[in-house]
């Protein structure tokens, strides 16, 4: 039972990490694009 709980927590942590990394990369890409657009 604890094993299933651990895997669930791991899945939640991994999904949160992936979402955070994706959001940061998107922000960096949009900021770079806006800088290029201004120039």
Image (tube, rainbow, N blue to C red):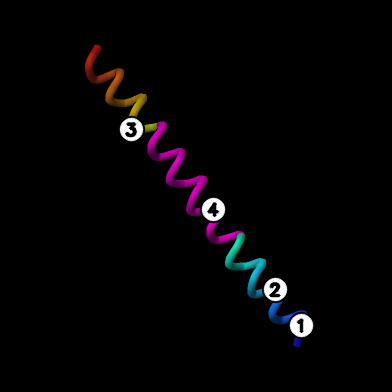
Kindly report the distance in space between the C-alpha atoms of the residues bearing marks 1 and 2.
Answer: 9 Å
Q: For the point 76% across and 82% down, which residue is it?
A: 2
Image x and y of residue 4, in percent: 71, 81
CB-based contact (under 8 Å), mark 1 and mark 2: no
| First-in-chain label (4 vs 1) | 1
Residue 16 image point, x, y percent: 53, 58
Mark 1 or 3 closer to N-term?
A: 1
Whole-Å distance between the Cαs marked 3 and 2? 34 Å
Where residue 32 appears, as percent x and y from the top left, is: 36, 24
Residue at (55% x, 61% y) in the render: 15
Q: How many marks?
A: 4
Range covered by the magenta-colored residues: 14-28
Say what secondary structure mark 4 lies in.
helix
Give the residue at x 58% y 67%: 12
Q: Earlier in the sequence, mark 4 or mark 3?
A: 4
In the rendered image, residue 8, in percent from the top left (x then y), is placed at 64, 75
Cα distance, mark 4 to mark 3?
18 Å
**10 relative to 24 in the view: left or right:** right
Q: Main secondary structure of the magenta part?
A: helix
Which numbered dot is residue 18? 4
Q: Can residue 23 be found in the magenta stretch?
A: yes
The residue that disc 1 covers is 2
């Amino acid at each position: 039972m604890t094993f299933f709980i651990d895997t669930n927590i791991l899945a939640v942590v991994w999904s949160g990490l992936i979402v955070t990394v994706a959001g940061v990369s998107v922000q960096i890409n949009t900021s770079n694009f806006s800088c290029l657009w201004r120039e």
